[in-house]
Amino acid sequence: MLLLISVLHFSYSAATSKKLTIDFALFHQKMAGKYGDTRTELSQQWERMLLGLTDLDDLEKLRRVNQFFQNNVRFKSDQALWGVSDYWATPLETLGKGFGDCEDYAIAKYISLRFAGIDDTKLRLIYVRARMGGPHSSVFEPHMVLGYYADPMAEPLILDNLVNTVALASERTDLSPVFSFNSEGLWAGHLSANQAASSPTARLSRWRDVLERMQQDGIGF
Amino acid sequence: MSLIKQLWVVIAVVLVLAFVSSFSISSYSARNYFSEQLNIKNIDNANMLALSISQLEKDPTLIELLVAAQFDTGHYQKIALILANGDTFLVKEYEAVVADSVPDWFSTLVPLNVLPGVAQIQDGWQQFGTLYVESHSRFAQQALWQSTSQMFFWFAVVALFSGAIGSLILKVITRPLDDVVAQAEAIGGRRFITSQEPRTLEFGRVVRAMNLLSLRVRNMLETENKRLDEMRIKFQLDELTGLNNRTTFMAALDAALASDDKTEPHMICMLRVFDLRVINQKLGHKATDKLLCDVATLLQQQGKRFEAQVGSVTLARINSSDFAILLTQADDIKEIHNSIQQSLLQLQQAHAAKVNIYFPLAATVFLSSEAKPDILIRLDNVLANAELTEEAGIELAYVPEQGQMFRSAAEWREALSTAINNNHITLKQYPVCYFDGTLFHSEAMVRVSLAGEQRSAGCFIAWARRLGLLPQLDVAVIRQALTILQGSETLILAVNMTIDTIKDHAIKNTILKLLQTQPELGKRLSLEFNEQAVIAEIEAFRDFVRVAKGLGIILGVQAAGNQFAQLKDIQELGLDYLKVDASLIRQLYTSPQDAKDFIGGFCGLGHSLGLTMIAEGVVDGYDISLLQQVGLDAITGPAVRAG
């Protein structure tokens, strides 16, 4: 009996995958299945873009990834696109639809940069308060951007769907940061990413839910 | 290992497997559930705290207070805040030892692997640090331990309960098996019994097959018995009266004379229907035949009456007008003679109106040591005298000269009881051999020390029977036989028993207890009963055999053959051997053709039941090869002693 219990003990898997992997074949196949063959062209472009990043420095990676999504995805609210007030889309959905809102951009860019080899500790998805319509406007909206920290103490570079260029945080006077997060700590330890996210309770978290869904598209942590 | 044990092991193994697997799975999923819940709590609390701190001015005191407030009011093992530059800003850790009942081995065996919740704290655009939150897992471990032990308890209860029910069901299912095995063993022990078919399909089939076998044996036996009996009637019996014919009677007389015990007293009565020719003329053929049959019936009644008092009774019509009665182991000639005479007088008076009938009656006692012609001449002389007087039955008894040891019944009783109680008994062994000379068993003949001398059965058996002391004598003999067996490794000893012994419940139980105490010796003890007695008390015999067989006692019937057809369902008894009556064996030489057919058939019948067939009373001058030829297996008698 003791033997059986110890067999049921799951082995410790070193699931702290620093490098993110993407099964492009599966990704394209899913794309074709869900959004039609024509959309695979975009996913293949994405693949080519990502594979082309290998030897570049971090700043260039940021620029190219940012540019790719700024060029290929157009803004549309979740309500208009998905019929719900808030929906976090996976990169597949974002690329498939060709539309997305702020967090969809941020997520897609985050995944792309992680794939390009940028460490999780350098990236943050940041909730910000965005002033809309110029420096003197009093219209604020909740917004999300992706921040890049060259080192822990550095001022971040901000990738924002509202502007096409990658800019230093200090240049973005229209944004004020509220809270940031990444996927650190989510799948360290004995539970693999798959198991942690597969639990229905864990999926109550939007963040973990979207991470789980993208694993089904071939994106592995 | 027995089938039932094996099935029980299967049940136990299945139960243990079910128990272990369900218990393990439950514990495992419980552990996972606890781990996951704690992990989620960690993540949520870390994020909440990080969110609060992110909004604050980064005043160290304030942050410390916030963390401390969270830590102190919540249930945490550890909260740590690591600054972005890698410095530790704050670590709060629960240090008190939590008293709980979780054994260490359990914590080691089923650890809760709960990941800390990790959350980032912002200071404006800058990273401030990373927050690590670990909830206290002891309470979870405690809950896990409790639920696991409870689960273990209930699973164990259910498993034990199922085990009990399983065993019970097993018992019900296999109950018919015991009966099947019992029947199979019975058939293996030559007891061809039938039993009720159990409902279980497979058992039913087996029992049906065994029943069929038993039935076939019974049918075969019935057919064969019928055929043999017809054959026997034809060559042994007088056609008109159904009594034995002359040859049979002479063979019986020869057999009595061939007895090992030369002191045995026997008795013959001979009566004549006087002037049968005249009667025949007067009454006519038919009425005369009727008269002869009446005489036969009368003799049969008398025979029945004395059967219990003597060794055996043989009634015969030895020629057209003469009848004879042979009583073995009988010495009370006066009583028997009187009784017959009285009944003859009645018959005579019943016919007095039509015709005068006289029944001259002669009787004599003789010993086994005497010669047949002497006895017959003596009897003829007496009968001739009786005829001359033309009176109805004149008592003419001849009592051989033999010193009577005791004068009265009381004295006899006293002497016999003393001898039995003081164990003044010895057994003389006579061999029963196969044809190649090897010993089948030794037959024990009882000698009782009376009046200072060893006396053979002939001296006292009639008195012992008359006084009802035979059962006690039998017990003493068995006791003696067991003592003899104890002194030998291989000896098989046969003891002759009277049927009265097993009719008496107290005596029977004494004997069975005696045999039970020495089960090993019992397997070398052979008990044999007289065929005539067995037929008369078949139920008592059947009961005894059933128990005795269970003890491994060897069982046989002696003086067998003359009434064998009346032994109903002998195939169910599981006997071991038959000793064919000496008078039948004798007839192999006096009327060889008929006897050969009959004994051959009888041996075939016995062999088909697995019985050993033994010829009794084999005397010098017999052609031993003839005995072998007709199918007998072993022989006993004076000729064997000599060899």
Image (cartoon, coloured by chain):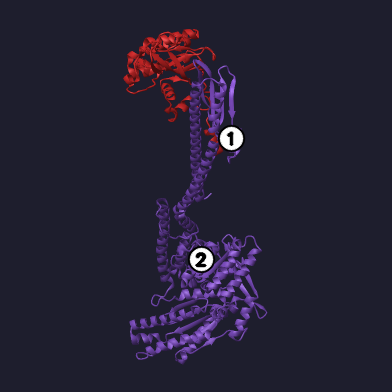
Chain colours: A red, B purple
Whether A91 is drawn above or below B520: the answer is above
Whether B616 is drawn above or below B301: the answer is above
**Residue B545, labelled with which disc?**
2
Marks 1 and 2 sit apart, C-alpha to C-alpha, by 69 Å
- Point out the tag, 1 or 2, that comes first from the N-terminus: 1
Res B383 seen here: no
| Disc 1 to disc 2: CB gap under 8 Å | no
Residue at image location 48% in from the left, 76% down from the top: B249
Indicate the position of residue B233 as horizontal and vertical percent values.
Answer: 41, 71
Closer to us: B205 or A193:
A193
Closer to us: A106 or B579:
A106
Res B225 seen here: yes
Q: Nearer the viewer, mark 1 or mark 2?
A: 1
Whether B127 is drawn above or below B611: the answer is above
Which chain does the numbered disc 2 sit on?
B
Q: Give the amino acid type for the residue marked by disc 2 in the picture.
A: Val
Q: Residues within 10 Å of mark 2 (few under 14, many from 20)?
A: many
In this picture, residue B615 sits left or right of residue B347: right
Indicate the position of residue B262 as horizontal and vertical percent values.
Answer: 59, 76
In this picture, residue B118 sits left or right of residue A88: right
Q: Provide the residue designation for mark 1.
A: B108
Which chain does the numbered disc 1 sit on?
B
Q: Residues within 10 Å of mark 1 (few under 14, many from 20)?
A: few
Label 2's element? helix
Q: Give the amino acid type for the residue marked by disc 1 in the picture.
A: Thr
Closer to us: B112 or B426:
B112
Label 1's element? helix
**Residue B596, labelled with which disc?**
none
Indicate the position of residue B4 as horizontal and vertical percent values.
Answer: 50, 51
Residue at image location 43% in from the left, 27% down from the top: A203
The quarter of the picture where the C terminus of chain B appears is bottom right
